Amino acid sequence: MAADPRFLKLDTLSLHAGQRPDPVTGARAVPIYQTTSFVFPDTDHAAALFNLERPGHIYSRISNPTVAVLEERVSALEGGVGAVATASGQAALHLAVATLMGQGGHIVSSGSIYGGSHNLFTHTLPRFGITTSFVDARDPAAFRKAIRPETRLVFGEVLGNPGLEVLDVPAVAQVAHDAGLPLMIDSTFTPPCLFRPLDHGADIVMHSATKFLGGHGIAIAGILVDGGRFDWERSGKFPTLTEPYAGYHGIDFAEEFGPAAFIMRARSEGLRDFGAAMSPQTAFYILQGIETLPLRMARHVENARKVVAFLKANAAVAWVNYPELAEHRDHALAARLLPKGAGSIFSFGVKGGREAGRKFIEALRVFSHLANVGDAKSLVIHPATTTHQQMDAAALKAAGVGEDLVRLSIGLEDAADLVDDLAQALRASQK
Amino acid sequence: MDLTVLGKRAHAATGGKAFDPARPAVVFIHGAGSDHTAWSLQTRYFAHRGRGVIAVDLPGHGKSEGPALPTIGAMADWLNAFLDAAGATDRALVGHSMGSLVALEAAARRPERVGKLALLGTTWPMAVTKDLLDPAKADDPLAGELITSWSHSRTGHFGGAEIPGLWLMGGSLALLARAAPGVIHNDLAACNAYQEAPAAAAKIKAPTLFLLGERDLMTHPRKAREFAALFAGAKIVVLPGAGHMFMAEAPGPTLDALKAFL
């Protein structure tokens, strides 16, 4: 029988990765190192830290011991080489883009992505000379066609937002790699106990840690994970990673750090200069969430399946869009990529259009109407009037957002209470 | 730094500063299936402190042209040829694991050139279990997983890296995944077959450091001490709590020990 490497398993890593009991105090929980800066033992040590000659903390905008535990933990859960925690998910996305490209760069993105990411790509990055082509999430060939000589990144979400199109991650990764490009996945809807994009060919993963990773709706947070498998030197398209950088005495990140080149540059330049760092207090909150992530996700999925079954049978419901349903266009792909569950965020249509939708949302008592997902509490929103309101009709259609679409994020309550709440609100919607 | 050595393209990292042959050279030699990036957290310091740094990619590794060389002796001859081509006359050799055997053999073959010898994560005989050789021979990713697992202390499996935000287990897996087909097995077989250590040790006149990890499962410090007894007056430093890959697991203490020795 083959030898077993006996790596710690995902549930164990959720509780322990990145931390050992504090050697000075014995503290078992991760201490909150609420400090801006760290004392240098001597001037030689200080100079070495500033020149990446030896590891350590300098200033909490660049790294902090509490934040570093979170970074390691998510890295471990995703199977990456390292991570940088950021002030928000949006900051993680911007950090990745800014690390990979400058003016003239181009992104090929799935059209079915978070409205905030869509805004960044469509309206904001072009001011800095970076443009994006959006393609059908369901069509890997469309990704291939949209790639140009100046393309530097292929981007998508495993489960599209809010249409829940399932991205064929291995196929799109192959398209990206054939063109010498990395694939980055926003895996916010699919935390690592459900799906690990790096295992399926992706090169970079980001999360809005505000959502399932944190799980309690108390802190805005993001994280960027480097898979360490993309060969930046072979690609030849990424001078930020393979050519001398004057910002650190001519350092060549790929030459110095090999598989960790991307994440080292993201921290050394991106956090230092753009400064969208995570606070230690926030890292502590997210770590508390991750400790129970596998347990919570199992319950999220279990509850979601019960709610989906209820909605499917309700006369006031026009349609239900959840990848585990046989009629979902990507059902087979979801079954292949997401055997542990297609998350707990999905959409459905209330019969009666916009007005019925309004009545439904306002009648809910357990579900909260707000702009978030992945909370322990169940949530509801109407994307056409909120998260996706900056998009015109064509873009809405391309993103799969109809005016009757209601998005639910199923929490951890007793499923019977969720079903009761939805039942009474659906009755109210039809009056 | 790219040179032509024995007719093939050969690469070495220089710690972020161009190699200057006028400066005393510190030469780093990586272990099985690895490359120069194993030394990321040691090389830059010396390069920016008046030393000429050469962290080689052995043939077939990293950015050096293959094929990988089949014996420790062949690797040692290649290393000496590289250093001659680079003009590094005053050399300190620092090798890790397989690289420690290469450093020893290279020093034994050119003792007049070597001022100091540091053998890290080392032992002899460097026997390799069939449990690892078999998957390595099949280019099964299990080989990289076993090396990664056994090269980190059990505590190291929990993480807590000195370098903020890096997951070292993932880094090791990613680095070993870069090895070209056959390279890991080539290296492990070379370690397994190396019999010349006693003869080589007898030729070493340079001060020699054994830098060991207290929790090293790959090259156990108890066995390493027996190996050290072959050398006249070798200095032994044990890094508390560290496993085999202590350049990453304990980069600060590793650097400090090298600074004190070199």
Image: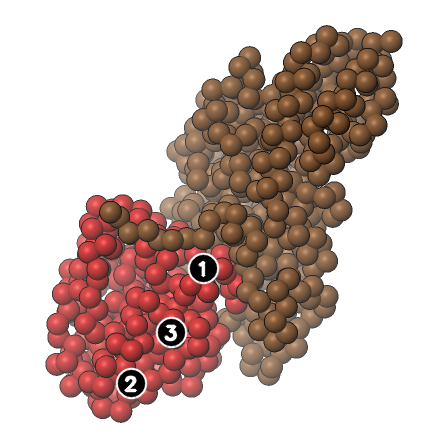
Find the distance from the CA under tag 3 to the CA under tag 1. 15 Å
Q: Are the residues tagged 3 and 1 within 8 Å (C-beta)?
A: no
Residue A219 left/right relative to A250 = right
The amino acid sitting under disc 1 is His
Earlier sequence position, callout 3 versus callout 1: 1
* Residue B140 position within the rendered picture, expressed as x and y whole percent measured from the top left: 27, 45
**Which residue in the structure is indicated by mark 3?**
B213
Chain B colour is red
Q: Element at badge 3?
A: strand
Where is residue A167 drawn, in percent x and y? 52, 27
Q: Are marks 2 and 3 on the same chain?
A: yes
Badges 2 and 3: C-beta atoms under 8 Å apart? no
Q: Nearer the viewer, mark 2 or mark 3?
A: 3
Work out which quarter of the rendered image holds the C terminus of chain B and state it. Answer: bottom left
Mark 1 = which residue?
B157
Image colour for chain A is: brown
Circle number at residue B208: 2
Q: Residue at x 54, y 30 (%)?
A: A341
**Residue at 33% in and 51% down:** A4
Badge 2: residue crowd in 10 Å (few <14, some 14–19, many ≥20): many
Identify the residue at image location x=45%, y=26%: A336
